[in-house]
Image (spheres, rainbow, N blue to C red):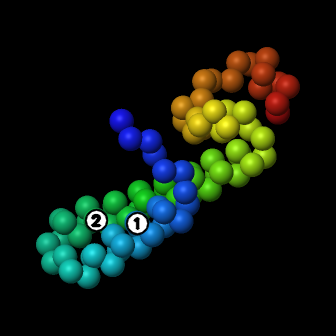
Amino acid sequence: MPKIIWNEMHWLRRAEDARTALGQIRNPECRAIVRRIADTYEQLAALSADFTNAARAGDPQARAGRTPSERPPIAPAQKARSG
């Protein structure tokens, strides 16, 4: 399985490319699909920025390459210490 690229600019460029392609698509259903794809690319860009910032801040989970959704749940005792 290929690794996900955690680079904000990469995903923003892909979103822009998808939105540019909308001008060439006439079918409304296809346009809606491509618009959702562009929106998803923008969400990946935001997650990439969060991931990069967490890694820079020294978050050990981010350094291990885990996104917030991939991280193990925080036990109640850990939440009290971290919160």
Q: Quadrant of the C terminus?
A: top right
The residue that mark 2 highlights is 34
Per the rendering, the mark at residue 14 is 1
Q: In the image as oriented, which residue stretches furthest toward the bottom?
A: 23
Residue 54 higher or lower than 44, as above or below: above
Q: Amino acid at mark 2?
A: Val
SS state under label 2? helix
Can residue 23 be seen by looking at this rendering? yes
51 vs 29, left or right, is: right
For the residue carrying disc 2, how many other residues have a C-alpha within 10 Å: few (<14), some (14-19), or many (20+)? some
- Given residues 64 and 31, the one toward you in this image is 64
Residue type at numbered disc 1:
Arg
Q: Secondary structure at mark 1?
A: helix
Camera-near label (1 vs 2) is 1
1 or 2: tag closer to the N-terminus: 1
Residue at the (19%, 76%) spot, across then down: 25
Vertical order, 18 against 51 (above or below): below
Q: Position of residue 60 (x, y in %)?
A: 72, 33
- The image shows residue 28 at horizontal and vertical percentages of 18, 71
Residue at point 65%, 51% (across, down): 52
Residue 47 in the image: state x and y as whole percent.
56, 51
Residue at figure coordinates x 74%, y 19% from the top left: 76
Q: Nearer the viewer, residue 66 or 1?
A: 1
